[in-house]
Amino acid sequence: MAKLELQNLSKSYSAKVTPLKQLSLSVEDGEFLTLLGPSGCGKSTTLRLIAGLEPPTQGEIRIGGRDVTQSLPGERNIAMVFQSYALYPHMSVYDNIASGLKLRRVASSEIRRQISEVSLFLGLENLMQRRPGQLSGGQRQRVALARALVRRPDVFLLDEPLSNLDALLREQVRAELKQIFSQQNAPIVYVTHDQTEAMTLSSRVAVLNDGLLQQLDSPRRIYSRPANRFVAGFIGTPQMNLLHLDCNRSCAMLGQYKIPLPVGARSLSEVILGIRPEHVRLVRPGDPIVIQGEVVVVENLGMSDLLTVRVEGKPEFVRTMLSPDQSWSGKSIKLSIPPEMIHWFDAQTGNRVSDATR
Amino acid sequence: MANSARSTAPRLGLWLAVGLILLLSLAPILWQLLTSLKTTADITAIPNVYFPRQLTLEHYIDIFQRQPFLRYMLNSAFVAVVSTLLCLLIGTPAAYVLARLKLPGEQIILTGVLIVTLFPYILLFLGLLELVRNFGLANNYLALIVPYTAINLPLTILVMRSFFQQLPHELEDAARVEGYSTAQMLLQILLPLTTPALVTTGILAFIAAWNEFIFALTFITRDSMKTVPVAVAQLSGTAVFEVPYGALAAATVVGTLPLVLLVLLFQRRIVQGLTAGAVKG
Amino acid sequence: MLKSPGKLNLQQQEQRTGWLLLAPALLLLLLVYVYPILRSFWLSFYSQNLGTELKPLFAGLDNYQRMAIDGRFWESLANTSFFTLVSVTLELGLGLGMALVLNQAFRGRGVVRTVALLPWALPTALIATTWTWIFNDQFGVWNDLLQRLGLIQTGVNWLGDPGWAIWTVIAADVWKTTPFIAILLLAGLQSISADFYEAHALDGASPIQSFFQITLPLLLPQIVIAALFRFAQAFGIFDLVQVMTGGGPGGATETVSIYIYATIMRYLDFGYGAALVVVTFAGLGLAVLLGAWSLSQLRRGAS
Ligand SMILES: Nc1ncnc2c1ncn2[C@@H]1O[C@H](COP(=O)(O)OP(=O)(O)OP(=O)(O)O)[C@@H](O)[C@H]1O
Ligand SMILES: [Mg+2]
């Protein structure tokens, strides 16, 4: 119905500040795309460009095949939910939700019908006459959602809509959001810097860093096959272990241990070995890659312990998550790195090296 | 013991200072009020009569009957209200633009606005006098309304701009995404939120317009069109034999009354406005 | 791409709306502030007075040459400078004291603040009549008070005495504008975090040390702003002097603005009046630039 397409979209505020560089992507109807990245990477800027709140320096925006790059925000039929919710403080909840429809001269009986439908859906029926100032944070959030939903827009934009809620409420609303938007048949672009939100809600995730698209993939693949060193380090908590290793004839050297390199990495002189802490485990007989080290810090995370281990003969640390049933004693520990869980990255470019082992 | 002595002494000093502030601020006004209620005999008694034997309203009756004082009040009110409204009407959109849109040359305009707040009116009056003559505006309220609007513009722009800057950006973004045009957004979203700031600025502009002297003295010479400050200042000059001290005092009391009321009602807002206007400097 | 050539892009549209909204204010400011100054500048090179039948005749620098040897002008400049210096200094000192008092916590503080603000809001011309009455030589309460206290034997003609007259104007001005300064400084005081004082007190500093080492330095920008603003206003003082003394006695309180007003309105000497305006403007501009420069230095030092 209204596919959203961005082509080579760039924005610079000045010669030095270029928060968005050559972004191209498309979001289908009903698809939930999340823009994920650290603070200042250009997520909000992207949304503001799509909404028409800022003109792009370069590139094109299409909605349903129509070029809207030069259209006013109001002409794009977009609904946006803001981090602060941006409810009009002087209007009642009802008027807040109705404002967009009134501007489009929808008949008032029709407005009433649509609002009662949405408010029933979101549990807002009893709050209609209140002012935003008389609502809790969660209720305000819902009103903002209602204001977006009632418009039946061509595109939904949400800028960190959960970040002003406390942790418990956030989890609950996250689940609700998932349910609400699974029923919407329009492209949804969602901005967050919280990976859990990105992973749980999205059909696809776009990881941005410094205005550049790093990877655009399903949440599963973002986690299991990070496209480069940045994505690998950014996605997943605790952070992936990233070890700088010298190569010696198709093997990477980790202390005295030799780790065979995949085909694509055999010409490199330096590689980065990535392994998630949850994949590092205590050694068992027959494990191919074993490292020995000294436990430096133990952090109890409840369901598991997070150990920081100094690798023997190397300045680097490896972190590992050990479930309670894996017990160890003393300072010295032997860990195993399962080869199939290793991510290889080119130390120079940071890009992922093809996994084919031969 | 030592502790309480240490804290009592500064406390005493504080109350003394507060008392002094109250006394010095109020004494001249109260003296004028007292004078206006005394009989002429008491006013001119030597040594001074502080507490009159008899209170009288004769001076008030005098200024309203023998002088067209009501007329002066209405003139002042008309000029001040119209120029205040005009000033808000013109200044608020300008303040919005300077707060939100990134126009080239914006910094220069702001600096200019700040600088003109420092101009004494005496520097302007010669040029304005010529304009008033050329446009035939002498003894026309426009000759006051236009300059009063202008002299209140810088403060209006600075105060309203600092107000707009405090408003969350996202509110306007939300309105624009929903389809409000710029004009609709200004009128339906921003204006209702701006009302408190408009009241504050309006009060400051009204006070300045009500108090202005040099333009009113120069551009209006017809007696029936004079504003309060000029009329009162000339009251003493018109007397041939003796200065009508009682009437002068009564006129002063009546002429300051609207402003006293404004201060009593809106002290907090006035202070906010003044500091918002000045701190941006 | 459907883009008609005449259509402005978003940014241009926004800017056009911006200029449209800004235009009335800018035009009015240009008309009332900039035009009169430029016009005076132009006129200052002309003779336009009763001698030229009020027609402007080009006169080059005549007006400025005349000013150089015009004793009355220099005297009014001296009066203005004296008035400005004394009254602004007093107002700053008293205003700071008042702000410090109003910043303390005490019962009824709101009421006291309201009362303290009152003098600032009242019309200067009316205040002038009030002070004229207070300093009246026959029936004035000031003479009466001093006599009752035994400080003077007979009444003094405060307004009619060339030595005292300027002080009556200063007293009235200080009374009226100290609240303004107090408000500005009070806002400054309120923005100084209490943490500073607590940390300083823990270091063993006395309140007086805190005042000089914390309050005064942090308040300095506000003090300079207030001083700058008051300086410009006091330098152009007109209504207070005009109503209280009219510049008299014998020119003892004649300020530059009173002289300008008389030159234009009484002597109808527009050319010379324009030159006086230009010189006053230039002098004031120079002083303000100096003040603004020192303020920017202060701000740089602070950040
Ligand atoms: N109006 C502006 N003028 C200049 N620079 C800006 C402007 N708006 C944003 N920026 C810069 O652009 C960069 C990206 O900002 P953006 O708001 O898109 O970040 P973000 O990814 O949304 O970050 P966050 O997670 O903190 O919200 C930042 O470095 C910011 O400083
Ligand atoms: Mg953001």
Image: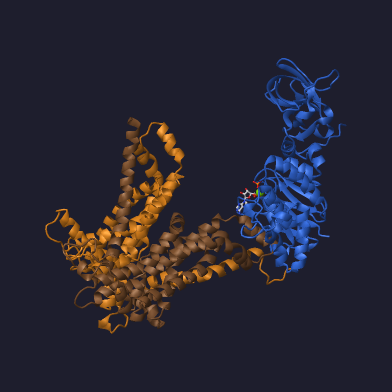
Say if residue A257 shows up in the picture. Answer: yes
Q: State the residue lying farthest toward the front.
A: B53
Give B249 or C132, whichever is nearer the viewer: B249
Which image quadrant for residue B1? Answer: top left
**What colour denotes chain C?**
orange
Say if residue C13 shows up in the picture. Answer: no
Q: Which residue is drawn at 74% across and 18% down?
A: A333
Which image quadrant for residue B40? Answer: bottom left
Q: Position of residue C230 (x, y in %)?
A: 35, 58
Relative to B245, is A167 above or below?
above
Give B200 or C114, whichever is nearer the viewer: C114
Relative to A287, is B60 above or below?
below
Relative to C212, is A290 above or below?
above
Q: State the residue lying farthest toward the right.
A: A358
Q: Which residue is drawn at 31% across and 75% down?
A: B61
**What colour denotes chain A?**
blue
Relative to A13, is B38 above or below?
below
Q: Position of residue C166 (x, y in %)?
A: 22, 61
Give C278 or A122, whichever is nearer the viewer: A122
How many labels, in total? 0
Q: State the residue lying farthest toward the bottom.
A: C53
Q: Position of residue C122 (x, y in %)?
A: 35, 64
Which image quadrant for residue A115? Answer: bottom right
Q: Position of residue A139 (x, y in %)?
A: 69, 50
Q: Could you say which chain is coloured brown in the image?
A: B
Q: Which colour scheme is used?
A: by chain
Give A191 or A223, whichever is nearer the viewer: A191
Q: State the residue lying farthest toward the left.
A: C153
Left or right: residue C124 compared with residue A13: left
Question: Which quarter of the rendering shows the N terminus of chain C?
Answer: bottom right
